[in-house]
Image (cartoon, rainbow, N blue to C red):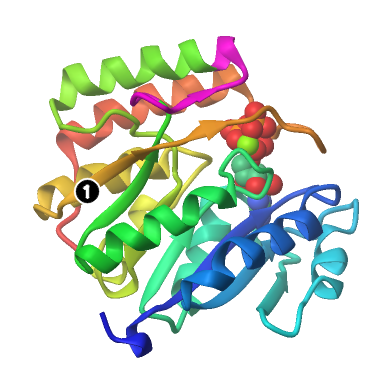
Amino acid sequence: MRKSERTVTVILPTYNEAGNISRLIRAIGEAMSPSGWRVTIHVVDDDSPDGTGLIAKKASKPNLAVKVTIRKKERGLASALLYGIRRATTRYILLMDSDFNHHPKYIPEMFKRIEEDPNLVVSGSRYMSGGGMDEKERFLGSQFLNDAMKLVLGMPITDYLSGFILIKSKRLRDMPLSWIFRGFGEWALRLHVVLQKKKCLVIEIPVYYPARTYGKTKMDPLRYAFALLKTLIEVNFLVPKD
Ligand SMILES: Nc1nc2c(ncn2[C@@H]2O[C@H](COP(=O)(O)OP(=O)(O)OP(=O)(O)O)[C@@H](O)[C@H]2O)c(=O)[nH]1
Ligand SMILES: [Mg+2]
């Protein structure tokens, strides 16, 4: 893989992640610097009352391009990712959370897989040997949802919901983006369904989610589980062509 092709935008959606954002930007920089990849970090913050956006603006480092958008009107996790995807100019895009659930230590392994096959999509999984999660109840809840997805969709995916994904920008842009990126974490399920329809090769690598150290969750478990089940029904009937 040519050096000029090793460019990536890491899209970090944030809402009230003041305790995490500087640490995360630093950790991403450290994880990536030996790889030789050219990295742009795009923080898409929804005007967090705790000042995450302003903290991110100060966290820019000489060896890292950090772009920060503070959105005043638009809201939502999937919508923030979509905002970043539409503006990325690099060959690859890395989608990840900003609270260390998705730990930067896995990024070199993701790059390695792409260097072996530039057309792969690499996705983190909690449900492979070596993967897992500190929060056991949440782990079991997501396992139940993943099992339901596997039963209905029958795809060779062990974690439809991680949303820790490295993918070619062009491949992503050829998809029905505004259909996929809506709501909270349901986008990851929709993305996997479209990848499968388009016969894209997805490989999973084991990832372990440590519990949050800073900040609070924005996930409402009942609402999210309901949205996922609704999405699971929806994807069986309606997947736009592009
Ligand atoms: N821009 C933006 N980011 C959001 C919004 N809601 C959540 N996020 C970010 O999306 C990521 C995932 O949200 P989390 O609250 O960690 O949800 P989770 O990972 O399902 O739950 P926990 O890890 O248990 O807290 C984090 O980086 C959040 O800061 C939002 O409305 N707008
Ligand atoms: Mg999280």
Callout 1: SS:
strand
Q: Quadrant of residue 56?
A: bottom right
Callout 1 amino acid: Val
Magenta stretch, residue numbers: 127-138
Magenta stretch contains residue 133: yes
Q: Quadrant of residue 91?
A: bottom left
| Vertical relation: 93 (above or below) 164 | below
Q: Residue furthest right?
A: 50
Q: Which residue is mark 1?
A: 202
Within 10 angstroms of label 1, few (less than 14), some, or many (20 or more) residues? some
User: Would you say 46 lies left or right of 84 here?
Assistant: right
Whether residue 97 is visible here, answered yes or no, is: yes
Q: Quadrant of residue 11?
A: bottom right
Whether residue 75 is visible here, answered yes or no, is: no
Depth check: 171 or 139 in front? 139
User: Would you say 91 lies left or right of 185 here?
Assistant: left
Point out residue 63 in the picture as x, y percentages from the top left corner.
68, 82
Figure quarter occupied by ligand 2:
top right
Point out residue 136 in the picture as x, y percentages from the top left corner.
57, 11
Who's the residue at 82% across and 38% down the image? 214
Point out residue 179 in the picture as x, y percentages from the top left corner.
34, 53
Q: Residue furthest front?
A: 34
